Image: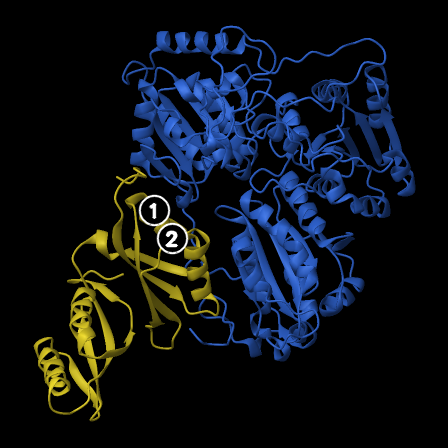
Chain colours: A yellow, B blue
Amino acid sequence: MPGDSNAPEVTAIIAVLVDNEPGILARVVGLFSGRGYNIESLTVAPVEEGGNLSRINIVTLGTPMVIEQIKAQLGRLVPVRRIADLTAEGPHIAREMALIKVICPHGSGEAGLKRAEALRLADAFRARVIDATTESFIFEMTGATEKLDAFLDLMRPLGLAEISRTGVAAMARGTRVI
Amino acid sequence: MTSHTAAPSSASPPESSQLPQAPGAEVLLRALKDQGVEVVFGYPGGSVLPIYDALFQQNAIRHILVRHEQAAVHAAEGYARSTGKVGCVLVTSGPGATNAVTGLADALMDSIPVVCLTGQVPTHLIGNDAFQEADTTGITRPATKHNYLVKRAGDLAHVVHEAFYVARTGRPGPVVVDLPKDILIGPAPYEPPRATPHPSYRPQTEPDAALIAEAVALMRQARKPVFYTGGGVINAGPEAAALLAELAHATGFPVTSTLMGLGAFPASDPAFLGMLGMHGTYEANMAMYECDLMVAVGVRFDDRVTGRLDAFSPGSRKIQIDIDPSSINKNVPVDVSIIADAGRGLAALLEEWRSAPPGAAPGVDREALTAWWRQIDSWRKVDCLRFEQARAPGAVIKPQYAIQRLATLMAADKRETFIATEVGQHQMWAAQFLKFDRPNHWLTSGGLGTMGYGLPAAMGAQIAHPEALVIDIAGEGSIQMNIQELGTLAQYHLPVKAFILNNQSLGMVRQWQELLHGGRYAESRTTAEPDFVKLADAYGALGLRARSVDELDGVIRTMLESPRMVVCEVAVDPAENCFPMIPSGAAHNEMILGGDRPGVPSFRGVGDPGRALV
């Protein structure tokens, strides 16, 4: 039961189905900033044919009491249709995608070793090379946030130059829908 | 998400081509009429001229020309609070809309249904920094329950209908409809309110039966129960207030109320403990601290009510009924949370309470309840609102005495009476000393604490109740925040009485400086007040002044008897503080009481954490 304001913070993934109207994203983001809630990541895109409904996936951090409050506050927004706390409601899948630019010039000696190492690790992590020059690679990688973080840590000493991450898209496992 | 068509949130609008067309401004007024709007409080300007032109050519909707847009919203709040209807505001773009923001935030905090129509520059100029352009939906987003920008003429009528629906249902609140000028001039299809339910906004009003049973089971076991009720009961309508009284009598439980809830339970009822919270009564706060069961109805556990959260009612089980799920478990965790309209929730509790056949259900421990009442009576004997008033001619008037005399002399008046207040010491004394027996007759700014609320709110109530006695209890500081509305009162011959307690200082600020800041009265003295009697005269009102205790009754009588607008200034003791007081960061059982009260545990002082609170 929520209640203890000294309880440890937990990560929650909240999916919100909203009417796709101008300003809805500002309402959601403004709610988080105005009430001092955390946003770890946020993704949004239309999900219905015709584009009338959008889904927002929010990863947030808070005590159980605050997470309950976030859901209740989201529920007050008029264009919000449904809210699912994927973390609380059962098993779920959470994935994000990243584009990762590594600058590691072709050549002999240490530089060449780095380039080869980057490719080997990418292979081990099932990251795809989607752009390559003699100076650089762009890897595309999809997976759990922790997997992306681990890969990025490995790329750092190898010439990691730029990261573009989508943030988390998530869904309940099995037949359960929002 | 990047769509630039302002589709309303309801699906399947009727085919616009089949609907009758008229200029947007006319369609707007027709929609307002459909929604039962009789009065609009507003102020014209460039972007809303088409609406004013349409208003000029009809008689169904009356327009009240205020002197400042903030006052228009407060007037609409006073109108709404005193009638139970939705208040309606009309302001122009840019400064018209930004001036209204304080009123909107006030209505949001106090859950008052208001629809505010704001003009906007034509759609093709939006975003171009046009003259009197402001991002009104952006600015008002956190100050409203919801807002709309109408970008297609085809959405106009439906959006207006939806705005009223959202404002008055669920937990009521302010809604803004931003109207670009081209939408008001060009043809728009008219449509009546749709019968289809809103696709996403569906507040739950009916309580869950199992939770009601659970709540009543706790109520039957309670030995030291208390009802803690608030503005939600008033918003649920007079029936809800009647149900509260019925339930309190059926159970024999005591009742305390928030500032916003005053009048929902009769103050003259022996079961009423008075207001609770920072300036609540000793008995109400002690009952909250010591109770073993709290039944909270239409309240939000505001910090002015709870005091220090970790010492708030430490030994009680808590039942909460609220229409807004976000009000439950927000500040204080409860044991049974019931999402429902306060009236429906009270009706269900009452039905369940009475459902058990005599002897079948475990009854309340009458003996324990009697002991609880004895305890409450001992707290009442502390007489926490007592003050000393010298009676010699020329003696300075205590502010409490001024309000007490007003209450007594008002009681003899046969008219229906509405009281508005500004914000500060006078507001708390009014809440302590006036006895409200009916809901919707007390208009005050609770959540936002908006100085300048009272005079326009009184104006709104007087518009709705032309025959009633409407009094704004004010301080000389607050009233000057919207004193320009004396002009509006004069224009419409509204006989509002402004009863100003003049203590020559911003009293509540001064009180906090005395108690928390070593008596360093930084900027809380107001040494160049206007001559309120002359000011009254300038606006065509009757000006009165009481300087000493012997003048008070006569002045109040003259005020009450006058058919005119009255500005009545009462010079009161500038040193008087408002007690009892739970200082910031203290618990309910750590009240500061005025004067000597032996045997009452006294407050131990405010620490730094307390000083950091507001």
- Residue linked to disc 2: A37
Query: Toward the viewer: A25 or B415?
Result: A25
Residue B236 is left or right of residue B73, and the answer is left
Q: Secondary structure at mark 2?
A: loop
Left or right of A137: which side holds B28?
A: right
Is B487 located above or below residue A110 in the figure? Answer: above
x and y percentages locating residue B398 in the rendered image: 73, 18
- Amino acid at the residue labelled 2: Tyr
Q: Which quadrant of the view contains residue B222? A: top left
Above or below B222: residue B18 = below
Which of the chains bears the disc numbered 2? Answer: A
Secondary-structure class at tag 1: helix
Foreground residue, B360 or B451? Answer: B451
Residue B333 locus on image (x, y percent)? 34, 35
What mark, if any, has residue B61 been given in the picture?
none
Residue placed most toward the observer, B539 or B354: B539
Q: Position of residue B296 (x, y in %)?
A: 43, 30
Amino acid on which disc 1 is placed? Val
Q: Which mark is residue A66?
A: 1
Q: Is residue B475 left or right of residue B275?
A: right
Disc 1 packing (10 Å; few <14; some 14–19; many ≥20): many
Numbered circles on residues, count: 2
At 41% across and 21% down in the image, what residue appears? B289
Q: Is residue B506 above or below residue B133?
A: above
Q: Are marks 1 and 2 in contact (CB under 8 Å)?
A: yes
- Asked if B64 appears above or below B250 in the picture, the reply is below
**N-terminal-most mark, 1 or 2:** 2
- Marks 1 and 2 sit apart, C-alpha to C-alpha, by 8 Å
Residue at (91% x, 37% y) in the render: B534
* Residue beneath the point at 60% across and 62% down: B177
Label 1 marks a residue whose chain is A
